[in-house]
Image (tube, grey):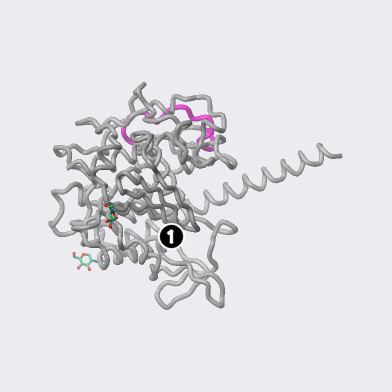
Amino acid sequence: MGFGYRSKIFLLLAQVLLLVVVTLAKTEVQSLSTYSKIISSSSNSSVSSSLRGRKVGRGVGARGRGRGRGIGRGRGLLGCDLYKGRWVVDTSYPLYAASSCPFIDSEFDCLKHGRSDTQYLKYAWKPDTCNLPRFDGLDLLNKWRGKKVMFVGDSLSLNQWESLACLLHASVPDAKTTFLHRDILTSLAFQDYNATIYLYRTPYLVDIVKQSIGRVLRLDSINGGDTWKDMDVLVFNSWHWWTHTGNMQPFDYIQDGSTISKDMDRLAAYYKGMSTWGKWVDLNVNPSKTKVFFQGISPTHYMGKEWGSSSRNCYGELQPVEGSSYPTGLPEAQVVLNKVLSSIKKPVTLLDVTTLSQLRKDAHPSTYGDTGVDCSHWCVPGLPDTWNQLMYASFLN
Ligand SMILES: *[C@@H]1O[C@H](CO)[C@@H](O)[C@H](O)[C@H]1NC(C)=O
Ligand SMILES: *[C@@H]1O[C@H](CO)[C@@H](O)[C@H](O)[C@H]1NC(C)=O
């Protein structure tokens, strides 16, 4: 018995897992198409159509002129649009060695898991009309002297936080650091610079509250925000968990105003939750002290047909998509997010990583992470280093 029996169970488990993944993917597609209808019927069509064309609030120039005055895309650098470009081979990459960074979690450590095709480490983002400034961690730590920087969100925030920790560490390898991890808050202090980068885990930004009926996702409540108030830099992100259902869903009900329901359209829920976050920003952020970023929607690669492949997911992908656009365009969630951002009055910089990340079907852990085929997170070193380079660029003005 022994082995044969076990391998049967394994096969069965693998089939169940596949079924779950396929179902999740289908659910997502369905709720996305439902929401595009809601968007085009009930919302301001001029706003959503111009957001589709990505014209709203691009760059500093759009600020203070009516709608979307809050959004900047971290342009600067003589008006160059850092987010329009393509991936080019650069043999000087990666910016640090995985083995020298003590802050990489196993789930992102693709090299540790034996990923042997290393070309994915050799791509640099090349904006069309300028060069992306090279990351200078020493300069950033000096700019951040006496400051607190906090990433707030889900595991994609963790992904970017770890990359930043590695990039900074690689710039000042001998600097004293203090790493603390407790519950939902992680921090890394660079003592010589009196600068700390925090990570606050909250996948929905809004609250999940235990009530007598069960766990309730409260679209209009954001008490976690009390912890974020004292920061000098805030980098928010939320999306992936909004699509989770079944065992992956950490709540039993959704509360929207006074209405409590078992479920609702997830993009509509996302819109409401992010609007609550937007109101929090308007009420609590002092722009002369705190710079606010939102990390754009981080794309997944679970549908090969999106990039014209017959493969089921990112497994075996060794190269980025060529050129500067992704066949399916912006994910609906980004359209919803843009709509929320354009209604915020305080300045918020969109770290507009969506398109450039959509091109990187090769940059996920795939089978070189902790579980199954992960086409949702990113290897570190890897793509999130570019997200941090883009964030760094917005501190150069
Ligand atoms: C659409 O825009 C108009 C004019 O800017 C405004 O009066 C109206 O309330 C908006 N509608 C919605 C649904 O946001
Ligand atoms: C370190 O930074 C904090 C603010 O984050 C400040 O209150 C404190 O005075 C600074 N300490 C030193 C030694 O500069």
Relative depth, front residue between 304 and 206: 206
Above or below 214: residue 89:
above
Relative depth, front residue between 383 and 234: 234
Position in image of residue 273 (x %, y %): 38, 64
Q: Residue extending furthest right?
A: 1
Quarter of the picture containing the C terminus is top left
Quarter location, residue 373: top right
Task: Report which residue position mark 1 lands on.
Answer: 204
Question: For disc 1, does the CB lie below 8 Å from ligand 1?
Answer: no
Instruction: Identify residue type, mark 1.
Output: Tyr
Above or below 73: residue 93:
above
Question: For the magenta stretch, what is the residue range?
Answer: 310-326
Q: Is residue 321 magenta?
A: yes
Q: Quadrant of ligand 1?
A: bottom left
Quarter location, residue 348: bottom left
Quarter location, residue 277: bottom left
Q: Is residue 49 magenta?
A: no
Rate crowding at label 1 as few (under 14), some (14 to 19) or many (20 or more) other CA atoms within 10 Å. many
Would residue 203 be seen by someone viewing this image from the given angle? no
Residue 294 shown left or right of residue 66 in the figure: right
For the point 13% across and 57% down, the residue is 64
Q: Main secondary structure of the magenta part?
A: loop
